[in-house]
Each structure stands twice: as C-alpha cells, then as structure tokens.
Image (cartoon, rainbow, N blue to C red):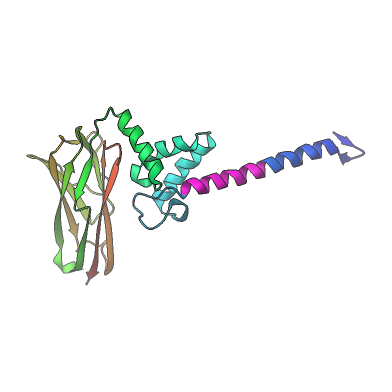
Amino acid sequence: MRINNKPCPLILSCIYLILFFQIAFAQNSSTIKSKIYSNFRDRRCTTMTLDKCNCPEAREMKAYIDALIETGVNKEEIFYKVAKKFSLNTILDKQIKAKVEERLIKEAGGKIPQIVLEPASFNLGQVSKKQGKIVKVFKLYNKGTEKLIVTNIKVSCSCVTASLAVGNNKSPYFGTQGAPSGWQAALDPAKSGELEVVVDLSHSAITAGKLFREITITTNDIMNPEVTIKIEGEVKE
C-alpha cells in the first residue's frame, strides 16, 4: 500500500523489524555454533579445536552440527549425535564426554566392542624411494565385551595398501576405494588380528620431502566408529 507514492510507515516498520530479527538470529546462531565448535576437535587433528580447523573432515563435522542447530536440536543432543556419528574422542569437555559415554554404554546394554591398535602410528624415519615397498604390521585388538565388526579399511593414497588377517582369514589388499560393500571381518572379545600396511616408496605419488599417509578403519565400536593410523617419514631420492 502506498500513500502519495510513498511507502506506508507501517510497512516500513514491519520490514525493519523483520530485518532486525533476521540479523539478531544470524548473530545468535553464529555465537552458538562458535561455542559448540570450540568443544570439539576433528578426530584426526590433535592441535586445533573445530572452530579453528578447516580440513575436509572438520568442514563435514561443522556442516552436520549446523544442520542439527538449524533443526532445533538442543546442545546436549548435539554432543551425543556428533559422538555417535564421528567419535566420542571428538568431544573435548571431560564432563560432557563422560555423560555421553555413559549414555552410549547404557544404550548398548553395557556390552560394547572396543578397537585398540598397537601401535596407533608409525614413523618410517628417513627413507629412500629406492627402498621400494616397506611393510609394517599393526596389531588390532578387540578389548571390549562384544564382537568387533570391521566393515571398511581405506587408505589415503594409491601408494599405500592394507590387508587385515583374523585367524586364518586374510582380506584382500584395500586401497583408496576401501573395502567393497558387504565386506567385513569379526573379532570376538579379547581376540586380535594383524593389519598389514604396505607403503610403496617407488610409487609416483611419493616425492622427496615429508611423507604423511593415513589408514582409516571403520568398525561397530560405538565410542570410536572410525580410527586412523598415521604413517610419517621423510623421503630422500
């Protein structure tokens, strides 16, 4: 409605009020996100909180948290859902983490699988491309009270492959595509397997300088659905 070709004051007031609430909501939402982000960290990053990290996995976690906030999920539920989807270890606040852990254990009826890798990382030291393939075996334990199901093993580079042996059953060597759909390996409580990792230093993807590669293992461990082995080194020609 216009009076004498001028906008109606009532309409202008409504527009200004709507804009004010939109800006206030956006600022409040941004503050909430920032506070929640600061209580998380990307499970692969040990040096920065989520609000300061912008790696692909951190962006994925932020997008998930944003979606939960926008749909009205409360703070307590956000921590629970993020822990269940990514890992309990992504939570930095010890009290919040303890409450979420208690809830997850109770939800599972007290029986949970628990994956433990020894070692959890490995440093190759100084190596040469001429050395070709280097093999490292990691012990994979189920230290929980329920059967541990491994559903995927995926590496970060085509220069790396990984295979899991449980008893007499040894999997194929998996690469960057991971295990095929439907593949799995099971470990009973107190049992272990061997994860054989092969790094091909002669591969074209490896150049002189710092080397950093990862192997990601996906399981039904409700505390840590994905664990990552880090392999480092320094490559000389």
Counting every numbered tag in the picture gives 0
Indicate the quadrant where residue 70 lies.
Answer: top right
Identify which residue is drawn at 44% across, 51% down: 50
Image side of residue 126 versus residue 1, left or right: left
Residue for point 28% across, 60% down = 212
> Can you see residue 84?
no
Which residue sits furthest bottom? 237
Q: Magenta segment: does it hold 33?
A: yes
The reply to whether residue 138 is visible in this rendering is: yes
Q: Quadrant of residue 214?
A: bottom left
**Which sits in the foreground, 196 or 86?**
86
Q: Position of residue 124 (x, y in %)?
A: 19, 63
Query: Looking at the picture, does residue 174 appear above or below residue 70?
Result: below
Q: Is residue 85 left or right of residue 237?
A: right
Q: Could you tell me which quadrant the N terminus lies in? A: top right
Above-or-below relation of 104 to 165: above
Q: Which residues are magenta?
A: 22-37
Give the residue furthest to the right: 4
Residue at position x 34%, y 52% from top?
Answer: 44
Where is the C terminus found, in terms of image quarters? bottom left
Kindly give the residue lying farthest to the front in the view shown.
Answer: 95
Residue 131 x/y as whole percent: 14, 66
